[in-house]
Structure formats: structure tokens, C-alpha cells
Image (cartoon, rainbow, N blue to C red):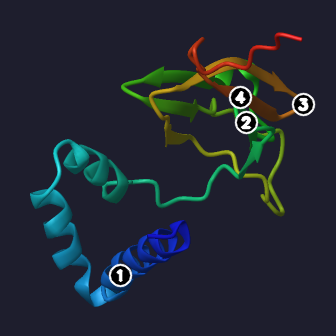
Amino acid sequence: MPSGSTKHKLAFKGATIMGTLARYHAANLPELLEKINRNSIGLDDYLNRFWDNDSTTNYPPYNLVQINNVESRLEIALAGFKKDEVKVYTEFGKLYVEGIKENKEADGEFVHKGLAQRNFSRAWTLTEDCEVRQVSFEDGLLVVELGKIVPDHHARKDYL
């Protein structure tokens, strides 16, 4: 049998699988999740974390920058916060950033108060191979440097 026909059979099988998945849409989502949970081991915890995301706020604003395939940077705008009012920590596979603003009496009456001065707590789920490498806070911008842990047998090695 020529190799071209084998390639064609594999492509056809892939199309069949994609056709099967394509029949699931928003109305069939519970049925799809039931099949996934019934036929998998360990994915239920992953799916629960995915669906139980309790972050419905968009404060504070942030950027997630992918530098390369093993490094990324989380930039969080924290105008009006001091370094000692911000906490950054990891726990149970999540990166937490919390801001606790001290209540101070203003020297006058606000005509307009446009700067958000509220407390916040945000969490991002980290993969098992991701680590926090550096955290810095300067000029109201919190920067969290993240990196993937690459095992030695997967790391690049130059021989010549």
C-alpha cells in the first residue's frame, strides 16, 4: 500500500473525529461534559477549576505578555497603591495578588473621584510547570515575571 493512501486514511480519521466534536455546541455542552467526565480520569478536577472561576471583576487592569515559549510577564496597573499595600503570593497552584488600601481622610472635598481606591483580590491559575521568577513594583506598575520549568532532558543543548 503506498504511503499516500495511509496519509489519506489518517486525514480522513481526523476529519471524522472533528466532525463528531463539531456536533456539540452550547446546547449540547452538558452532554459533552458528561461524556468527558465519564471517560476520563483526573480531568474532573481540571474542568471544575475551569468552570468555577469566580473572577467576575476586571479590576485592576492587567496585561499578560508572552515573551517567548518559556517566559511571560504579568503587568498589573495599581495607580495609587504603595508597595506595602500590595501582597503577591502563590498557594495551591494559583498566583494571588491582593491590594489593601489604607483609608485616609482627604484634605478637602472631592469634586470628582476618578481613581479607584478600593481593595481587591485577583487570582490566576498556574500550570504545574510554571513558576514565579521575579516580582517588582515601581511607579504604580506591578510586574510578575513567570517562567516554565524545563527539565534537563528537554532543554536545548548545543554540541557544536
**Residue at image x 51%, y 31%?**
96
Which amino acid is tagged 4?
Val
Which amino acid is tagged 3?
Asp
Give the mark nearest the N terminus, 4 or 3: 3
**In 3D space, how far apart are the residues under numbered discs 1 and 4 (Cα atoms)?**
43 Å
Label 4 residue SS: strand
Q: Which mark is residue 125?
A: none
Per the image, the residue denoted by label 1 is 16
Label 2 residue SS: strand
- Of tags 1 and 4, which is closer to the observer? 1
Q: Residue 72 carries which label?
A: 2
**In 3D space, how far apart are the residues under numbered discs 4 and 3 (Cα atoms)?**
14 Å
Residues at discs 2 and 3 in contact (Cβ within 8 Å)? no
Give the mark nearest the N terminus, 1 or 4: 1
Residues at discs 1 and 3 in contact (Cβ within 8 Å)? no
Estimate the x, y position of residue 69 in percent, counting from the top left.
72, 38
* 144 with respect to 21 (left or right): right
Per the image, the residue denoted by label 3 is 139
Q: Residue furthest left?
A: 38
**In 3D space, how far apart are the residues under numbered discs 1 and 3 (Cα atoms)?**
54 Å
Estimate the x, y position of residue 121 in percent, counting from the top left.
51, 40
Q: How crowded is mark 4: few (under 14 residues within 10 Å), some or many (20 or more)?
A: many
